[in-house]
Image (tube, rainbow, N blue to C red):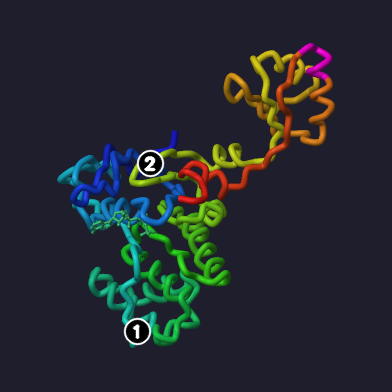
Amino acid sequence: MSEILLQTKGLTKQYGRHCAVDQVNLHIKKGAVYGFIGRNGAGKTTFLKMISGLSSPTSGEIEMFGYKEKELSRVRSRIGCLIEEPGLYGNMSAFENLSMKCRLFGIKKRDYVEQILETIGLKEAGKKKIKHFSLGMKQRLGIGLALVGEPDLLVLDEPINGLDPQGIVEVRDMILKLSEEKHMTIIISSHILEELSKIATDYGIIHRGVLLQELSREELMKKCCERIEITMDQPRQAVPILDSMGFANYQIVDSEHVFIYERLEESALLNRELNRSDIYVKEIKITNEELETYFLNMTGGANI
Ligand code: ATP
């Protein structure tokens, strides 16, 4: 089993009578890109601030790198975060902004800033003043600032929010690079599941402060991928027929449904074979639930 780098137990943040984060038990594996998905106001920023040490929980526990409670302060420096707007000085260049943060961290290595500029793809623009940067460039620089000090966990709050398609691609590619080349563990929040699905290995869905579900990329894809869905009584009855027809990739989902993830073009044939064996099929259909629909359904439909 993969090592858990960060977990929370019953983590809660109360603002007066409003519970912004409600008893959240979340788990981030070492090396994961954890997609933290929720609508506006779901509690994402509040949660990320608590794990980053920018806000204290009302109750509950955070454990990271094997430390918890009072000992957490020993490992906070292993987190790099970009939460809300990156604090950038517009009249300074990317190089100068990064150099300033390095000084604060006591980092004196000469080529350190160049290395970060390279990682975030801003080497060419290093001397340009920030006020002339695109939003995507600013966001990448914000991530660059979070990288100072080589964090083991990178916390990114809606880093693609408000970016144009080109900016989204730039930031996404950079996150993939950090994950694949530097094996960094990353938690990234968004309100667009489709966008996270291109980079995340694991997911947590938060709604009104409550963590509704945690699932792996494979589990999510299985829920949303193309399949034949059969509705019937006692779906176990279908197993011998499916086996005799050579179907291998199927699942009895509950007491009424079988999902088959292969040979979608054979649904009519399958229906005939089941009927021949006196197995009554209530419904057989091919579905492909879109990621976004899945997320919207999980969080109460499109109109709330
Ligand atoms: P968004 O993407 O819109 O920022 P979010 O999922 O990050 O959404 P949060 O910013 O964590 O959500 O806010 C969760 C809830 O807590 C919201 O209802 C918000 O109004 C409330 N909230 C956040 N910060 C405070 C605060 N300092 N005082 C009072 N209420 C707050």
Give the residue type that dot 2 points to: Leu
Query: Can you identify the residue that label 1 sits on?
Result: 90
Query: Circle 1 — which element?
Result: loop
- Magenta region, main secondary structure: helix
Query: Callout 2 environment at 10 Å: few (<14), some (14 to 19), or many (20+)?
Result: many
Give the residue type that dot 1 points to: Gly
Q: Are marks 2 and 1 in contact (CB under 8 Å)?
A: no
Q: CA distance from mark 2 to mark 1?
A: 37 Å
> Quadrant of the rendered structure where residue 60 is?
top left
Residue 72 visible within the image: no
Foreground residue among 26 and 106: 26
Query: Can you identify the residue that label 2 sits on?
Result: 211
Residue 279 belongs to magenta span: no
Q: Which residues are magenta?
A: 273-278
Query: Circle 2 — which element?
Result: strand
Residue sitting at x 43%, y 51%: 38
Foreground residue among 133 and 279: 279
Query: Callout 1 environment at 10 Å: few (<14), some (14 to 19), or many (20+)?
Result: some
